[in-house]
Image (tube, rainbow, N blue to C red):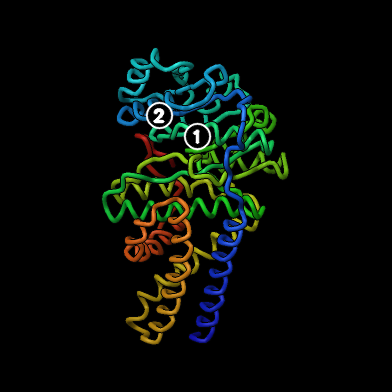
Amino acid sequence: MGFVYSIFSIVLICCYLIVISTYIYHWKRMEVWSVPKGFEPLTSISIVVAARNESENISDCLNALNGLEYPKELLEIFIVNDHSEDDTASVVQSISDDIAGLTLLNLPAGLEGKKNAINYGVNKASGKLIVSTDADCIVNKDWLLNLSSFYQYNNYKFIAAPVLFHKEKTIFEKFQSLDFMGMMAVSAAGIRGGFMNMCNGANLAYERQAFIDVNGFAGNTHLASGDDMLLMQKIAEHFPGKVGYIKNLNSKTLTCAQPSVSRFIQQRLRWTSKSEAYSGWQIKTMLAIVWLLCLSMCFDCILMFFYPGLFSLFMLKFLVKALADFFFLGMMSSFFKRQELMWSFLPALFFHWWYIVWVGTAGNLTKGFNWKGRRSL
């Protein structure tokens, strides 16, 4: 049994190195996008923001959107209030007159959830390109110039863009920031390599007609999450080769990490709940490899007290994963100019494999989580 487990562990380590190397290869090969000189925006854009209980954040989000350098005649902004129980709607209403093109929409009774909110906003929109972000995000003034130029020059139907955390105060929040930067590289590499469709709903752009052509979120409405990756998956299948990732620092959106472990776990459980709908063996295989390696490390930690020989095997896994992750995350922190986060790498490394096992297991077994005052089962 010990020999078989050792061979299994070595295979897992090799598979993990292949996965990380694949991500690094495709990220490095992806060109950095820059707005071409003399670029003239021609694309009409509708920004759709679903908001629920975001009274503390919505003002900063709207102020950032108001500062966008994009022709006002080509831009409209829809804030879709998803039955907020706080002052979200009144905050938006109070500043709506100061922001050109801003419209507050209240989701009708009988409809709830982010997918319904986005769908409602898209149905009201007139722009050729739908751009979505979250109500707790802020953007820089060149955000739309980068997205629209990338769209006009490449004619993609769906564009994924980077999302980063900022204003981290604790080691736990810095861990989330590092982990999230890794997800951005995974998303970009998967899209470039054509083996994985991953993205984040806090920074997306897609053609309104493409959304209509694939019938929006139909088929995924039973899942509380999935307004991003599952829509991307449908568009990628309907329009092969028409999904892109914009590798550009100024195209990012910024949000804050979860302040507590409980809220972090609920967020990740919500994300994991949509995994049953993933299509393609590549994404499932890669996620399984990471989960299995982390699971084996957890088992090693527990069983080495009874089988001391497992200590050497555990240390091999730990050191290989540490070196691979350090190089991978160091590459990302350098690109996004957040090198200071690497000082938190070691504590983040210890937390990472435990959380992968817990969330990966619980998210696929329970399907239940609390989010924005709602309970999903």
Query: How far separated are the C-alphas under marks 2 and 1?
Result: 10 Å
Q: Residues within 10 Å of mark 1 (few under 14, many from 20)?
A: many
**Residue located at (31% from left, 22% from top):** 87
Q: Residue furthest left?
A: 170
Residue 120 in the image, given as x and y percentages of width and height? 53, 23
Q: Are marks 2 and 1 in contact (CB under 8 Å)?
A: no
Label placed on residue 143: 1
User: Circle 2 sits in a helix, a strand or a loop, which is it?
Assistant: helix
Relative to the observer, which residue lies in front, 154 or 345?
154
The image shows residue 350, relative to residue 133, as above or below, that is: below
The image shows residue 212, relative to residue 354, as above or below, that is: above
Looking at numbered disc 1 in the image, what kind of residue is underneath it?
Answer: Trp
**Residue located at (52% from left, 86% from top):** 3
**Residue located at (35% from left, 48% from top):** 264
Which quadrant of the figure has residue 27?
bottom right
Residue 283 in the image, given as x and y percentages of width and height? 60, 56
User: Circle 1 sits in a helix, a strand or a loop, which is it?
Assistant: helix
